Image: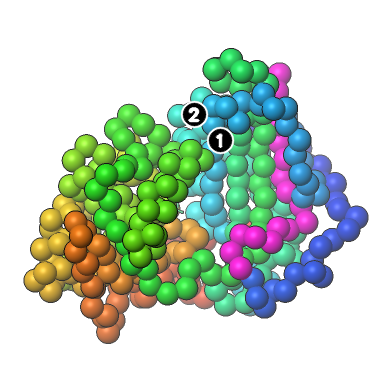
Amino acid sequence: MNAVINNIEVIKTKTSKIHDVDFEHLSFGSTFSDHMLECDFKDGKWQAPKVVPYHSITLDPSAKIFHYGQSIFEGMKAYKDANNDVYLFRPIDNCKRLNISAKRLAIPEVPENYFMEGLKTLLKVDSDWIPKNEGCSLYIRPFIFATGNGFHASPSNEYKFIIATAPSGSYFAGKVKVLIEETYSRSANGGVGFAKAGGNYAGQFYPTQLAIEKGYQQVIWTDDNTHEYIEEAGAMNIFIRINDTLITGPTSDRILDGITRKSVIDIAKAEGISVEIRKIKVHEVVAAARNGTLREMFGAGTAAVISPISGFGYHGEDFDIPEQSKPYAGFLKKRITDIQTNKCEDPFGWRFKVE
Ligand SMILES: *Cc1c(COP(=O)(O)O)cnc(C)c1O
């Protein structure tokens, strides 16, 4: 869906914060660029998007976001190559997924050209905020939330769509130890697990806290019905390598259709790695850990790209995954980030030059 759009209005900040930022020591997602894209839905339609100075937002206490949680988001990154050219990675997929999430949460869909032209304009205005250092990127957070007022439990009639950005270093350092969840669920059949809805994360925090108290860093989500099948790793898709086969679950109501996940699948296949997209039982992974055929587990998502797992806990027992001399995780991460940052050919057509 597109809508008529002329030039996007840009209102520049008078006081840039860029000189306060230490680009050599960036953390993840905690420093924000000078500008943001802002677009309001009112009177039954999305108004013209604008690039404006990054600013706080005032809402009425009855704003529906606070009470009924109509809130969705995306996560993506922009990169600068050696020539200062700026690239996104499969951005149309993020736009399409934002609208898939919007539909499920009864939020009006954003016209694709508002998203894409708005984002490109924002990146041009804040181009100096895109880090060039190895492993760094400009993390991009598009999100929509309900701004309409009233305690009546019904969809809001007003919304705000924002794209804010944050120059960022790498997300995690090192491998994580995970706990396979046997009680709580991230998502359910017919639910909103396939959407990037804010509430999905709220529901993950408490079980994750419990896992952290037990000495793990992250939860491996299993199916809500039986807890017998492995589904996701925290807020990432999960890959399991048994012998030389890479296995990941099929997307569904419960498993989010990650862009990193599908890129990993395509790269692995192109490299001749055997990939199976099928349901995978916890018992199969435990058996593989016991007989030595479990060689790797890793999460896949935009923020960390690939997050290797060093071992897992299940039913009171801990299992270590032995270090591999040539892990798929490292190889796949390098292939993806080389494509993203224009360090190699892009046979898949995923790289998107911002111009
Ligand atoms: C965002 C997200 C992912 C990863 O998606 P990418 O498009 O690869 O960033 C995976 N699982 C969940 C639950 C997510 O919210």
Label 1 neighbour load within 10 Å: few <14, some 14-19, many 20+: many
User: How far from the left and from the top, in percent, is residue 298?
Assistant: 33, 65
Quickly name the residue at label 1. 71
198 shown above or below 211: above
List the single residue furthest toward the front.
213
User: How far from the left and from the top, in percent, is residue 102?
Assistant: 52, 32
> Which one is in front, 153 or 32?
153
Q: Quadrant of the N terminus?
A: top right
Would you say the residues marked 1 and 2 are in contact, meaning their CB atoms lie under 8 Å apart? Answer: yes
> Which one is in front, 349 or 154?
154
- Count of labels shown? 2
In this image, 319 relative to 42: left or right? Answer: left
User: How far from the left and from the top, in percent, is residue 40?
Assistant: 71, 31
Residue depicted at x 86% and y 53%: 13
Magenta region: 27-46
In this image, 244 relative to 184: left or right? Answer: left
Quickly name the residue at label 2. 105
Q: Is residue 7 magenta?
A: no
Amino acid type assigned to the residue bearing label 1 in the image: Ser
Q: Is mark 2 within 8 Å of ligand 1?
A: no
Q: Quadrant of the C terminus?
A: bottom right
Residue depicted at x 71% and y 18%: 43
User: How far from the left and from the top, in percent, is residue 255?
Assistant: 33, 44
Residue depicted at x 84% and y 61%: 16
Residue 153 sits in quarter: top right
Distance CA(mark 1)–CA(mark 2) = 8 Å
Secondary-structure class at tag 1:
strand
